[in-house]
Amino acid sequence: MRLDNVLQLGIKELRGLVRDPMLLVLIVYSFTLAVYAGAKALPETLNRAAIAIVDEDHSPVSTRIGMAFTAPYFSEPRLISPYEMDRRMDAGLDTFALDIPPDFQRDLLARKSPAIQLNVDATRISQAFNGGGYVEQIVGAEVAEFLAHTRDAQAAPIELALRARFNPELKKSWFGAIDHIITSITMLSIILTGAALIREREHGTIEHLLVMPVTPLEIMVSKVWSMGAVVLIASALSILFVVKGWLAVTIDGSVALFLVGAALQLFATTSMGIFLATVAGSMPQFGLLLIMILLPLQTLSGSMTPRESMPQFVQDIMLAAPNTHFVMLAQAILFRGAGLEAVWPQLLALTLIGVVFFAIALRRFRAFLA
Amino acid sequence: MSAAAAADAPPAPGIVVHLEGVGLSYGKTRALDAVTLDLPSGCMIGLIGPDGVGKSSLLALIAGARAIQEGRIHVLGGDMASTRHRRNVCPDIAYMPQGLGKNLYPTLSVFENIDFFGRLFGHDKAERRRRIAGLLRDTGLTPFADRPAAKLSGGMKQKVGLCCALIHDPELLILDEPTTGVDPLSRRQFWELIASIRSSRPGMSVIVSTAYMEEAAQFDFLVAMNAGRVLATGTPAALLQQTGADTLDDAFIHLLPEEDRSNHTSVVIPPRSNGHDEIAIEADHLTRRFNDFVAVDDVSFRIRKGEIFGFLGSNGCGKTTTMKMLTGLLPVSGGNARLFGNAIDAGDMSVRRRIGYMSQGFSLYSELTVAQNLDLHARLFELPLETIAARIDEMITRFDLADVTDALPDALPLGLRQRLSLAVAMIHAPDILILDEPTSGVDPVARDRFWQILAELSRKDNVTIFVSTHFMNEAERCDRISLMHAGKVLTSDTPAAIVAARGTATLEQAFIACLEEAIADTADAAAPPAAASPAPAGTAAPRKRSATFNLTRMLAYSRREALELQRDPIRATLAILGSVLLLFVLGYGISMDVENLTFAVLDRDDSAISRDYSLQIAGSRYFTEKPPITDYADLDRRMRAGEIGLAIELPPGFGRDVSRGRHVEIGAWVDGANPTRAETLRSYAQAIHATWLAQKGRELYGEAAIAGSYQLQLRYRYNPDVRSVVAMAPGIIPLLLIMIPAVLAALAVVREKELGSIVNFYVTPVTRLEFLLGTQLPYVVLAFGNFLLLVGFALVVFGVPFTGSFATYALAALLYVTATTGMGLVISAFMNSQIAALFGTVLLTLIPAIQYSGLIDPVSSLQGLGALVGRLYPTTYFVTISRGTFSKGLAFDTLHNDLLALAIMVPVLVTAGAMLLKKQAR
């Protein structure tokens, strides 16, 4: 492999990119506005969950409970009749419906242990589980306080002081921004290398390269480095100016270390792009393959939902995907301020995956050119 | 004549096209400047001139394919700037753009291609069959009716293109370089065909641009153009007389302004000095098979060093394949090839350095400037760095590229581009040049200059040149030529000897005689075109004039798109099976049931009670215990590494304090990096803590301590087992039904733009709405089939119960996929390259659909831009319907508002797509 050839061919790729203004606009968009919107749009934890209250008791305690659900966690509770409850839940208007039975207060004071019913729309999966806990806590606190006023209850002597580390307020915008950058890195690197290769083939220029003293390895490495560099620089700028600057997210760890990880991730994903382009015969086919790869990568790598909760076989399979390791690495470095001593297993895994992907793609690419 | 003949300012009778002060610019480049011209009707009009003088632009303007920038253009008695007139006359105009088979659909068969045009012009089935049969018979294409257009030779493609143009009996036929890149025999057949059609339809006017002057000499009326302006008009005889030249070639050169003409000299190739008998290229029984098809069959020849060796033959006869084998691009199936006595090895870099290769069609980087292209290739060929600048200068001077060093190749006329290709092929001073139709489509002046350079290279620098061409005057300049047909070499000798052996007057006649003999020998060959039977005369179909919306035309597009989809089974299979696979992966993968959370305890007390507290957490099915934490540093390190999600610190004296009822505080930290998970961790931890407290309370203080409180009954509705897959599958179906249909629809339109067949939409009566809806329909059908499959899969494989009204769900799905394919069409209006369309569509569907459409967080809880996008996005409504009908047992009465939202989006998107689409190139 001659480095000079690799350099020259890579510069050619960069010049080609500069000539496609629409593509440049899309690249800039996906690292700026898309990141910003992604960070700002996600609700902060439980945000404005829709709750309705069926108050059949109309007692001080039931009123007290009704007033306890406040913004930003809940939207203002609607007081509804028991008959409305089912209809509103069916229509998806309420996620929670709290039914306080008649004579609740009387039974409570009589130590009859009355039951409150909480209906949860379990199809709204994210709010259903977390929100249920919140509602339980709030009702519990209100009831306890009410009882404390009316009789001598023993205050719970054992307290659990819970704090969230790294992101004390559990702001989702941090997470959303980084999640977006990771998505953009993967998506762009695959599209830029893969589609550029298909375009070269459709325009006949790849054949032209083959009559010159240039090896397939050189052609492939040049595409990997040039497109990888574009995405890497774009993501570095995005972290510095959009995430740190515009969104004012405090980043604990070393951005440089994160970029090392990103470079390794790009090594793997650009190779993947080349591989896909050799498999796909035309741009529409490439587009479909791309969707089939991108969707699982994005949703199953642990950036959207935690890995621990996926079935074991999915977790195992996803260990072969570079994104999984990259997401772990990015979260550790950027959120928890972890250093090399903590993330070296991810760096190692990314390197290994990158090398394997590159080797497979090169094999395919050689066969594809022959 | 057109019904709108009485429109404003009718030009003189007998004039078919009237141009006045027409100008056109592409950015800074001036393509046409103040062209004023009258073209007589009922005759054969030739447009001649070098490349890049604006011939194609002028024809596109006349055909209405390109929007007028300056001046007035009247065609068939009306103003082409008026949309109404264009719509009225487009059934009377037929336009065949430049490029072999440019407006054909490669995967469709010959019959289907012509049939598509017939449908666009509103012929009924019987009429189409009759016309197509007649056209195929006249063009000799009947045996190939079922062959895909991509597998036809160049000459046949042009004939099919002509059939497509003639299906609707045009008054005006516009052909842009129809015979460029077509071999002499096919070319002759093509013109015979035109002549016979004209004899049966004498009123028809034909406008042709051509680079072949011998063809132009046969026309009735010529327009000579240069640099965006008209040089002269008149009959060929008048032009010859005016310039006093013998041939049209010379006449044209005379017409050129002085500065363009000055550097033209007739090509003189000095005879070879007999010094070199070394064999440079040797082919020995060379054979190449593609599956069953033998492309090159037992070809042998030897080319001596410094010789110019010509390769002639019909399109698809194996010339290019032979050349590719010699360059090592294609492996040989049999026989062998040697360069300077060495067998060709594709991996051998030293051989590549000795060859310069120019492939058929321009294949340099259009994104690099002329100088950058030269520089890149010089470096790739490892010229010593210090010599590169000098070598590039030498090439620029020699190939006369000095004026255009910073231009992009696409902005250059073909002749210049071909010179650049040759300069690139020569940059490393190779011993052998292999040139595949280097002058195809190049004008006579540029061709002569090109050959002048070849002559110098051969005679002065002793470069061996192996060149293929369709031009007979070029063939005559070669030292020796080979005639090829159907993979075999028919004859191989000096041009003079071939003419002598055949006893014909010209090389062209000798060539055609050779070919006809070869064709007659081959049993499976097509019968030569029957002397054109009177073509589809008489029953001119009753024209359905410009109905604003015509179902037949729309369905013509649908049918064509469906056929293309059917011919690309990989695409359809990927779309359908891919989505099922994704449903499977995502349905199992995305899970909100947070389990297996990791925790570790820093137990500073280590009493029975503190251990009991740890056990309480470890016993929960949600938590997995990790080894105990030793100190704060350990806690910190392990949390940073993501090893533990929850850390509990039990203070010293915990057990004692609890027993005595003193106030104790347990420290707990959750990893906040992933807020959703942290949230869950927190609520689980609190719940477990509360349970433990209750238990302890009971043990320590008896029942009375805790009794008297209340119970909270949690009812998870619609999904009582709280299975993630039951909640996720109805959400994933909308996600899959937006991305795939939108990408496919967007690419369908942009692909037409990139590959050129969009011109059919520009010049046929099809309206924007017909085009869009027609293209959309097959993808709606595909997506709806996909929907049924996905639902079936969710029911059977995932066991997701379906409780609501399926009819409502299906109706919503139909509206939804119409909206999502519509989104693809809207996006396609902004994009010109497939890459950008693909990227843009993925970007605009993936993120909003996953994050802002209620798939994970309800739209009501979103804020800012996300909330806005979420409210406008179709996925939001379909997610509600999908979950409602799947899990909540809902039907139309509850969901009608969401259905209405979807129903409104369909016309909005389709109208937006139609408004944004341009009916003319700009």
Image (cartoon, rainbow, N blue to C red):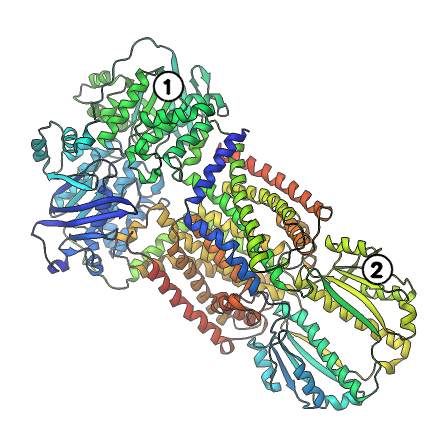
| Residue at 76% in and 67% down | A162
Residue at 14% across, 50% down: B20
Dot 2: element: strand
Secondary structure at numbered mark 1: strand
Chain of the residue on which disc 1 is drawn: B
Residue bearing the label numbered 2: B602
Q: Determine if residue B482 is in view.
A: no
Q: Earlier in the sequence, mark 1 or mark 2?
A: 1
- For this orientation, the residue located farthest to the top is B275
Badge 2: residue crowd in 10 Å (few <14, some 14–19, many ≥20)? many
Q: Which of A365 and A246 is in front in this view?
A: A246
Tell me which amino acid carries mark 1.
Ser
Task: Give the left or right position of residue B696, taking residue A325 as reference.
Answer: right
Left or right, residue B339 beside residue B172: right
Q: Position of residue B216 (x, y in %)?
A: 16, 35
Q: Could one spot residue B19 in this view of the protein? A: yes
Chain for mark 2? Answer: B
Q: Where does label 1 land, which residue? A: B300
